[in-house]
Image (tube, grey):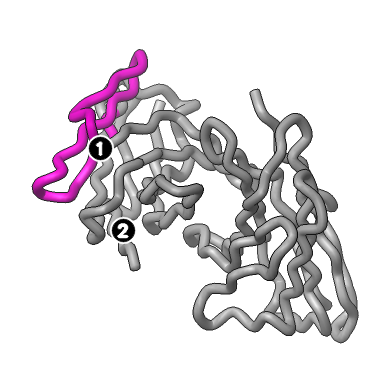
Amino acid sequence: GENVEQHPSTLSVQEGDSAVIKCTYSDSASNYFPWYKQELGKRPQLIIDIRSNVGEKKDQRIAVTLNKTAKHFSLHITETQPEDSAVYFCAASWEGAGSYQLTFGKGTKLSVIP
Amino acid sequence: GAVVSQHPSRVICKSGTSVKIECRSLDFQATTMFWYRQFPKQSLMLMATSNEGSKATYEQGVEKDKFLINHASLTLSTLTVTSAHPEDSSFYICSARYTEAFFGQGTRLTVV
């Protein structure tokens, strides 16, 4: 089955700096890679996702890049703000024939220091 | 956007009792729902895939007789933790796929 590795496990940045979180996956058949933000005691919220036919996607201060050959994808947050502080999870899945099972990375606790 | 509602959000039960958690897709039909367990400061671990009208598919190491899943309609899946013990205390989250995966609010189960 799929295995997703995520690094780092914790990340502290100064407000205004950039944050980068990296993930690798093992199953070359995976074709969907979402990123979730989870605040303490809350449900995960999708912040951005990318499919295997795209190399990069950007949404305001958030971007995701995908390298299918190396089987890794990264989350980039620019101009970080204190409200970006949360746990971020990457995930991977193969989507087809009604299959949408996600495999999550272990998470990165991001702390943005004012 | 699509909404997945999970109930209850918190429950405290005595050891040996059973607890039922409901997961509803409010504005879409979900033939498949997923149940996750999350320990403090850890990731979401898939417990089982709930399939409408058929048996759930459990992940390796998850006791199907302990975690009973019923998906009787296209908008409702239930997880029953039977004969709960303190080690079952955890955060349980369901999800259903629409345009993306939508998660329920989660249920904080505490077994005393």
Q: With respect to residue A31, does B100 lie above or below?
A: above
Q: Position of residue A39 (x, y in %)?
A: 56, 41
Q: Position of residue A6 (x, y in %)?
A: 29, 54
Q: Position of residue A67 (x, y in %)?
A: 14, 40
Q: Nearer the viewer, residue B81 or B112?
A: B81
Q: Write the residue at 40% across / 52% down.
A: A107
Residue furthest top in the image: A60
Q: Position of residue A63 (x, y in %)?
A: 29, 25
In what element is the residue under mark 2?
strand
In what element is the residue under mark 1?
loop
Say if labels 2 and 1 share a chain.
yes
CA–CA distance in space, label 2 to label 1: 16 Å
Are the residues flagged by discs 2 and 1 in contact, CB closer than 8 Å? no
* Residue A67 as seen in the image, left or right of residue A77: left
Q: With respect to residue B14, does A67 lie above or below?
A: above
Q: Write the residue at 74% across / 60% down.
A: B53
Q: With respect to residue B37, does B33 lie above or below?
A: above
Name which residue type carries label 1.
Ser
Which residues, given as a range, are shown in magenta? A52-76
Q: Main secondary structure of the magenta part?
A: strand
Residue B54 shown in magenta: no
Write down the residue under mark 2: A4
**Numbered mark located on residue B23 in the image:** none
Q: Write the residue at 81% across / 57% down.
A: B72
* Residue B61 as seen in the image, left or right of residue B4: left
Q: Write the residue at 73% across / 84% down.
A: B65
Write down the residue under mark 1: A52
Name which residue type carries label 2.
Val
> How many labels were placed on the picture?
2
For the C terminus of chain B, the quadrant is bottom right
Q: Chain of mark 2?
A: A
